[in-house]
Image (cartoon, rainbow, N blue to C red):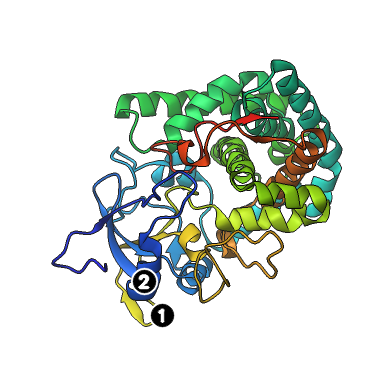
Amino acid sequence: MCPSQDREPLRYPLHGSTALEAPEEWDALHERCPFARVTLPSGDEATLLTRHEDVRQVLADPRFTNVLRAGDAARISDEESGGVFGSDMAMAIPARGETHRRWRQTVGRWFTAERIATLRPGIEAMAEKLVDDMVAHGHPADLRTHLAYPLPVWVICDLLGVPAADHDRFAYWSDVMLNLTRYGQDEIEQAQDDFVDYMAAHVYTKRETPSADLLSDLVIEWDPDGEPMSERELVFTGQALLVAGHETTTNVIGKTVALLLADRRRWERLLADRSLVHSAVEEALRFDADPGIGVPRYLDEEAEISGQVLPPGTTVMCCTAAANRDATVFDTPGEMVLDRSPNPHLAFGTGPHSCLGQALARAELRIVLHVLLRRLPSLELAAPAADLRRLEGLAVGGLSEVPVRW
């Protein structure tokens, strides 16, 4: 099971037999091969980590950077920059040290628990409206199209101060940036250029006529040293937040609802006890078997992890989903336990590069579940769970549709 130097590496990412099931290889990797050789979609090789402690340690270690632009770094996708992790967007945002800390501090003020609490009424009202529209459409309906996609788009557009009416444009740009196999180099470059031009125009507008939104705040915000965020940083920060704020949350909402409906007993338990929504969201995040490619890290100096010496130039793929099924950390990891506590999952990462918008994502998930439980208690999948199809080729995992009826 553990690919050695004289055996073919595993093709990565690994997938389960259905869109909601975990890959069979994870158990063997946990037990016998915590540092596995894998081949990425680009054809380059990397080292795969699947144990909770190893993944947690790497994500918290500043020696492992999240920018894959070094000449010997593995490319995730087979194009010039190697994919989103080696893109200009990734390069523009400070990756480590004091500049990274200041960037997170400045942007993070918009994602505190207190700030998210002020957004809840608006998010709930929009979720209600979208459910109204879905009900008016009639069933069966695709929950992804009617709710899981438009809600995060509206939320992040409202937060950034960009028009939600442009969602088709940046949905396409996001898909190009996050797709590992579908687009050619010319199409990728054109989409990146168009996206940058779009965000640059909005930065200019906010500089001329600022309003009460995150992008305006970043334009006029000065860090503790009195240095404004550069135009390049502003554009790519807005771009990164727009991509992450709708694409990943859309997919997580769809998978969470699908997981809860895949075994009707889960949905019935939430109907009987709404106080479980909080822990159920955390368990859905842990149980998600397909968050995508994982979290890549590049090492430019020697480092030792769990007794394994990794040489400079190593690209590590941290599979947080596999780490979240580690039996040394989680009892019955292959079962979805709605009241699991504690639940130290790594779905949002950890350390200096943990997901900046995790409080917002959690709020959206909880609101969606509360609204659906109240409005559509008879909600069920309109197709067998085994027939749900995964989105192919994206760096983030998701379902192509979530057919439901009520």
Say above or below: 3 vs 201: below
The residue identified by callout 1 is 306
Q: Which mark is residue 113?
A: none
The residue drawn where x is 33% and y is 35% is 181
- Which is more toward the observer, 56 or 63? 56
Question: Which is more toward the observer, 368 or 81?
Answer: 368
Which residue appears at 33% of the width and 54% of the height?
70
Q: With respect to residue 390, does 260 lie above or below? A: below
Give the residue at x 76% y 34%: 213
The x and y percentages for residue 43 are 24, 47
Circles 2, 1 touching at the beta carbon (< 8 Å): yes
Q: Is residue 351 found left or right of 173 in the rendered image?
A: right
Left or right side of 199 for 342? right
Whole-percent x and y of residue 319?
44, 59
**Residue 257 in sight in this render:** yes
Q: CA distance from mark 2 to mark 1?
A: 9 Å
The structure residue drawn at horizontal position 70% and vertical position 51%, both measured from the top left corner, is 108
Disc on res. 34:
2
Residue type beneath disc 1: Ser
